[in-house]
Each structure stands twice: as C-alpha cells, then as structure tokens.
Amino acid sequence: MTIDYMHGALLGITKGLMTLWFKSDRKEDYHCGHHLQEIDQMLLAMRPPLDIHRTPRSIQDHMQHWKASELRAWLLFYSLPIMLHFLPTKYYEHYALLVSAMYILLKDSITEADLQKADDLLKQFVEGYGKQHMYGSTRVSLNVHSLLHYVNTVRELGPLWAHSCFFFEDVNGQVLRLIHGTQGVEEQVLRAVAILQKFSEMGEKCFEPGTASRKLYDRLSSVVLSPEERSNFQQIAKGYHMVGTLKEEFRRANGTYGNLKKCHMDVVLANVDFVPERFIVYQRLMKDGEMIHSRMYGRPVRHNSYTIAFMSNGITCYGEVLYFLQASVRTCSCSLAQRTCQCDSVKSRHFAIVQCFEPVAPTEGDPENANPLYSVPHIFKCKVTEACAAVKLSYISGKVVSMYINGNIYVAKFPNRVEKD
C-alpha cells in the first residue's frame, strides 16, 4: 500500500501548518495572521506559468476551499519566498526541511543519494515538529508520522506523483460530468460510459482519417489534434513548432533589420556563421509538447509562461523570453531582388531572445540573503540585468515559476514535467 501525499502532505500537513500560522492563537510565536493582508497581496500578485492552471486565491477569504493542487503550488513554490518576510527563523528553517524533502521525492529521476538526503530532512522535520518550543507533541498527527515512511514508499513504488490520488481525483471529476440529474445516478453513469465507448469504436470504423467528417468527429470526441494538423503550427524540427503569427524582417542596406533592436541582432550574429538576409519573428514555441510563450505574446493576463531556464556554457541560467526568431539566408542562385526564395536552399537558425537574470548570492551583513532559502535546492533569488542572450532552442530546459516579491525575483524549478494541475 502506498502513502498518498495529496491527502497526507498537502491536505493534511501543509494545510495544517497554514491553519496554525494564520488561524491560531495570537500568543503563539508562529502566528502570522496579523500579516495576512500583506501575505495575500504578495500571493495574489503571483503569475504562474500555464502548467499551474489555478492562479493563487486569497488565504484570508478562500483557504478553507483551496484544492490540493493549490496547496502543492504553495508548498513547492510560493510559500518560502513569501514567508521569509513573516515567519520566525526557527519555524522557517524547520518548514524548509519539508519543502526540500518533498521536492526531492517528486522529481522524475531520484538517486539513492537523493533518497538518503530526503530521509534525513524528513526525520529532522518530524523530530522538530513535536518539540515543545515548536508545535508540540500533541500536534504530531498520523500525517506527520507518515512522513517517516515516504522514502521507503518512493524506493519501492517510484516518485510520489506516480502513485498519488491526483489522477483518480481527476477521473472522479470526469465521472461527475456524466451525471445530469438526481434520479438513477448509477444508470446515468453506466449509460454514458457505454455510449462513449461505442462512440469511439464506431468513429474509428466509420470515418476515414483526414476527411472533413473525421475532423468533425475528432472535435466532438475531444480528440486533441496533433501540432501537424493545426493551421497555426509550423514544424521547425522534430518536436519543435513555431506557433501563431509570423512576422518577417529583411536586412536593409544600412545593415539593420526593420524594428529589431541592434543589441538583439548583435547576440544573434555572434551565434551564426552567416549574415542573415531575413528574420522571422514569432511569439510562441512548442518544444516536445510544452508550450513556451514570449513577453511579446500578451493574451494571458494572470499567467507568466515566458520565464525559462536555459543552459549556457554548461551552467543553468534564467531569464525572460522577449520573442523567438528565425535567422535565414539563401544559399541558392535565386535572384537577390527576389524577396522570398522559392527553393529549399535556405540556411536558417532559430533562437529565443532572452533578457537574462543574474543569481543573487548570499552576502555577509545582509539578513535577507543569509537565510535558509539558499539551502533549498530548487528556488533561487535573482535580479534582472540589461544583458540579452540568443539561446538556441535545444538549450531551453523549460519554464520556471517566476515570483516578484518586494522588488526581488525568485525563480523555482518544477520537480517534474509529468504532474499537471
């Protein structure tokens, strides 16, 4: 039998700690309820990537209604950068043990050394939790004690996300949508499931792929079209697609490229072995099934899907994608006056133009920098720089959670790319 972290660590421990911090007796050292307005202001300003479907809700007004996915985002991403400013140091250090351990056990690749580290962190957390000067032995519930068995569960059954109740809760939601009345609920579910199964079977037999009727059937049956079947997707390479409107910029006689900034062109030219004749600017990229936006794409208001991690000289760096572009030059004998080459002899390279972040290292004498957040493996404090980089698309590691708090930027990496809201 597995231990379900969704009910245990999230709906149990995480929500319990939030109740202690924000709803407990004001005399307690860990009480932060008098800062709730400030905390809510920071939380509601968060703009997570679209991988986190639910944008943050107020703790003061909605905490009792928070879903497990909201508690997961709070635990792994939002809580440490926010509570750094309010939670007393000993409680903050203690809580960071739980966050670090849960992140490790939710990774998509976990080594034996990772398991040993997570086990040590959880043992320290459980031991400290019950001490009199912390939360007290009377609050060591079954969920808290179960943390001591999480590592063995992962060792035997895999990462926590592989056997949690999130998937089953999602299926419960799908079943609920099959019910349309209060009478004969069982019959409604069975009938709807039978219809869906037969609908799928008949559709595959009756409609030829690629026909208008098959496309209508796919839309009715909620079949997700592949990128190749979407009109606004253009394949660059295997697993890579330009998405949305494409804008062309041509090289002028003075060496400029339309409205593109010179500093951006300089970093591109430093990464190509030819002089581009044309740039194609686009706002979105799909890489291996993951959609990455640029700041130029302004449709999402409450989400930030343009802050990324990328590799540079073997080091993980962070920044915001300003836009994507393709640099190309004709390598054929077509007329130079011809704006658009009609043959396939075109050399091209694709880049993300990124405004870079610079990590902020801990410094002596600065109480905010000398804190336990620097011991957490996946959250980093950064600052925006004026430097830009032309990042090859294959060097993009993926999106990160970007948090602006009190003039500082914190970025947090996802533990895995499998678990979605």
Image: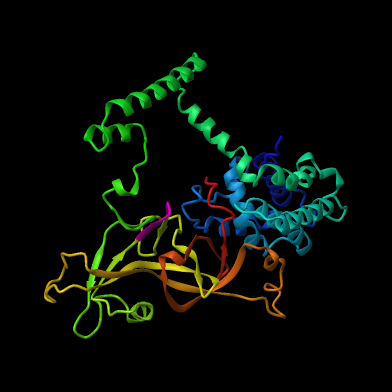
Is 95 magenta? The answer is no
What residue sits 72% from the left and 52% below the top? Answer: 21
Q: Predominant secondary structure in magenta?
A: strand
Corner quadrant of residue 392: bottom left
Q: Residue furthest right?
A: 132
Q: State the quadrant of the N terminus.
A: top right
Corner quadrant of residue 114: bottom right
Q: With respect to residue 13, does 46 lie above or below?
A: below
Mark count: 0
- Residue 178 in view (yes/no): yes
Residue 152: x and y, percent?
A: 75, 45
Please state if 108 lies on the left or on the right of 226 as rendered: right
Residue 31: x and y, percent?
A: 74, 54
Residue 125: x and y, percent?
A: 79, 54
What residue sits 67% from the left and 51% below the top? Answer: 105
- Which of the pair 166/71 is nearer the observer? 166
Residue 297: x and y, percent?
A: 35, 60
Is 286 magenta? The answer is yes
What residue sits 57% from the left and 34% below the top? Answer: 168
Q: With respect to residue 216, does 122 lie above or below?
A: below
Task: Identify the image's colour scheme: rainbow, by chain, secondary structure or one colour.
Answer: rainbow
Region of the chain picked out in magenta, as a range: 284-290
Corner quadrant of residue 142: top right
- Residue 66 in view (yes/no): no
Please state if 276 lies on the left or on the right of 313 as rendered: left
